[in-house]
Amino acid sequence: MSKAIKSKICKCLQTGSKLVIADNSGAKEIQIINVYKYKGVKRRISKGGIGDIFIGAVTKGKPEIKHKLEMAIIIRQRKAIARADGTRVKFEDNAAVLVKDRKIAEPKGTIVKGPVAREVTERFSKLSKVCKVIV
């Protein structure tokens, strides 16, 4: 079960955005199709930010995983997020990690490359086990 995020997350990644895959699952790039639990009005494009689960199409990667629909979690975004203590954190790229199931949020890969936002590891505890750098 996912927990609430204490920081103010700007929802800057919308449908059609391409993200780098930061784990060793075989995919290299994914395009957002739909963000889970997005609440908006009719015909509004769904948007997501750090800690959101989405369904996407793999655009680059190994042939067996390419062009397939996969679930993923956003772990980094370029737009700054405001934390409760007043600090702002932003990353140099937009990145995601593939997961097996959206309810359990267990990652498909065994290693996550690059830093991961602390808000994501607080929300999904199984993801924090494979992360090396938590910012």
Image: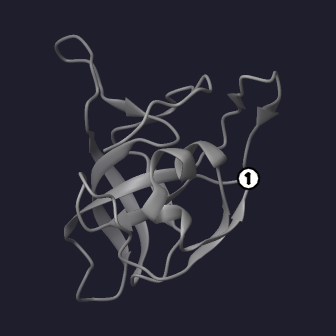
Question: Percent from the top left, x then y, of residue 50?
Answer: 53, 41
Q: Residue at x 37, y 66 (%)?
A: 98
Quarter of the image with the N terminus is top left
Task: Name the residue nearer the viewer: 114 or 42.
Answer: 114
Q: Indicate the quadrant where residue 113 lies.
A: bottom right
Residue at 31% in and 29% down: 46
Residue at 23% x, 61% y: name it. Answer: 101
Residue found 45% across the figure and 52% down from its top: 124
- In the rendered view, tell whether residue 14 sits above or below residue 102: above
- Which amino acid type is shown beneath numbered disc 1? Glu
Q: How is the image coloured?
A: one colour
- Provide residue 102's location: percent of width, then percent of height: 25, 53
Side of 68 where 125 appears, left or right: right
Residue at the far top: name it: 41
Residue 92 in the image: x percent, y percent? 73, 52
Q: Which residue is mark 1?
A: 92
